[in-house]
Each structure stands twice: as structure tokens, then as C-alpha cells.
Image (cartoon, grey):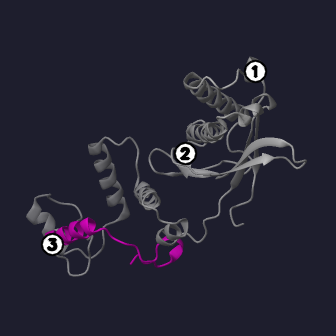
Amino acid sequence: MVRQGKGGRDRMVPLAPAMVEDLRRYWAFHRHPLLLFPNAGRGPCAPDQLAGRMRQATSPMPVSSLQRLVIVARKELGIPDATIHSLRHSFATHLIEAGASLHTVQALLGHKQINTTMVMVTFTLPELLRALFFTPDARQIYDLFFRAAAEALSETLANPRWLGAQCSGFTMILHTWNQRLHFHPHLHCITPGAGLDAAGRVVTVKSPGFLVPQPVLRAAFRARFRQKLAALAGHNAEVPAIDPSVWEQDWGVHLQAFGDGRR
């Protein structure tokens, strides 16, 4: 039970069996009748003397002491940057990697809401490339389209010059026709304007109207698609020749704010 945590609310959080055993060993060291983390105060660090001071403590360990312990541990482990709050973000990351839903993470971390700035990114291929979707390799072309867009978006979001989110996510939807029912393959990607950086800290967009620079994302998408198409053509002689002027065109990549995730 976490009492008076984030937002002044109480909440229940799980403990891994290994952590429970570590906490039991820690308490067995000092055996304070009420506190798990008593304030050791200042004095000699010999085990018996330290345990004695902890057993007689009248207050819990101050936050400043815990912060100093995190700094010492991080230096010993060679971690360049981490704070107490990083542990909270790491907990959330492990939950998500283990398959927990966002609402489960929200409840365990004590967040009142999970709203964030949502951005819709649209990737559209130039007209000169649309004939590729009518070849025997159409399935591979569609797959290539998805992978090129996903890699371009992930890499641009991870760039520390922009969002710096090493861990990010998005939902991609393929549309093959436009409003006039003309063949017009394009991908809509819905992504939150947030993610986790290399240290596990939450990073968010600085402005609701800006995710990453459009020209940077456009160039990354074009480069990824060209690279993957060349690899496919190298293994399959049926891929038709491409007009080289298509690589000099401005590819259709658009970014648009898309609400806060409540709909």
C-alpha cells in the first residue's frame, strides 16, 4: 500500500517475490518495530552501530538520503543519468513490455488521467510508385510501405534533437483510396506526443502543434523506402524499373494535432 502518493491518493502496488525477500533481509538487519526504512542519522558505519541507530530511529529515512543512495548506486553501475523518478518510469516500461494495459499502468502509478497530445502523421507515396502495388510483389510492397514509414517515424522520434523518445508507439492504418475512389495508398499513424528516453524518463512534445520537423521525417521516409525497395529488387527481377526522378520529389508526409486521446 502506497499512502498519500501521487496526487495525495492511496493505492496498491505489486511487489515481485525477489523484492519481498530483499525487503525482509533489510528489515532483519535493523528490526525497527515500526519502520521499514528508518533514518540512520549520522555516525559510524560499522554494521552493529548502524543497525543500532536504525533500530532506535524516531523518523523514516529522508528523501535526500534516498536520492544520495541512488546517485551512489548509479555511479557504481556506470549509468550516466538516473534519478528516483527514473525508477518509476522503469517500472512503467517493464509493465508495458510484460503486456500490461495502459489503464493498468495508470492505476499502479497513480495517474488521474492518461491523456496526452495525439498527432496524426500521414505517409503518402508519389504517383510514380503506385504501379508497384499492381505487380506480383504487391504483398511485399505493402509490407515495405509499412516498415519504411514505421522505421522513419521511430528513428525521428528517437532523435534527441526532437522528441528524444527511444521508446515510442503508434497505430498505423492503411487507406488505399481517396474520397473520389481513386487508387491512392497512404498510411495514417496516430502517435502520442510522448515517450520514454534512454534513461526511462517520460519526454513530451514542447508544443501541441509540433512533433518532429516535417522535412526531416519526409527525408527519412523516402530514404527508408528507397533502401528497402532496392533490397527487394536485388532479390526479385520482377520489380519494375523506377523513374529516378521520384527520389528528388517532395514526398507526402503531413503532421496534424489530433486531440488528447480521450476519443
Is residue 146 something one can see in this rendering?
Answer: yes
In the picture shown, does residue 251 fall above or below 54? Answer: above
Q: CA distance from mark 1 to mark 2?
A: 29 Å
N-terminal of the pair, mark 1 or mark 2, is 2
| Residue 71 x %, y % | 33, 49
Q: Which residue is mark 3?
A: 28
Task: Please identify the quadrant where the C terminus is shown.
Answer: bottom right
The region drawn magenta spans 1-30
Q: Residue 42 colored magenta?
A: no
Q: Residues within 10 Å of mark 3 (few under 14, many from 20)?
A: few
Regarding mark 1 in the picture, which secondary structure is present there? Answer: helix
Q: Disc 2 designates what residue?
A: 165
Q: Determine the CA span between mark 1 and mark 3.
A: 69 Å
The reply to whether the C-beta atoms of the residues labelled 3 and 2 are less than 8 Å apart is: no
- Which amino acid type is marked by label 2? Ala
Which comes before the other along the chain, label 1 or label 3? 3
Left or right of 142: which side holds 165? Answer: left
The image position of residue 26, as x and y in percent, is 20, 67
Dot 1 and dot 3 residues touching (CB under 8 Å) = no
Residue farthest toward the bottom in the current orientation of the protein: 33
Residue identifier under label 1: 248
Total numbered labels placed on residues in the image: 3
**Residue found at x 42% / y 56%:** 90
Indicate the quadrant where residue 145 lies. top right
User: Visible in this render: residue 203?
Assistant: no
The amino acid marked with disc number 3 is Ala
Q: Would you say 107 lies left or right of 204 here?
A: left
Structural crowding at the residue carrying mark 1, measured as other residues with C-alpha within 10 Å and reported as few (<14), some (14–19) or many (≥20): few
Front residue of 86/127: it is: 127
Secondary structure of the residue carrying tag 3 is: helix
The answer to if 7 sits in the magenta stretch is yes
Q: CA distance from mark 3 to mark 2?
A: 41 Å
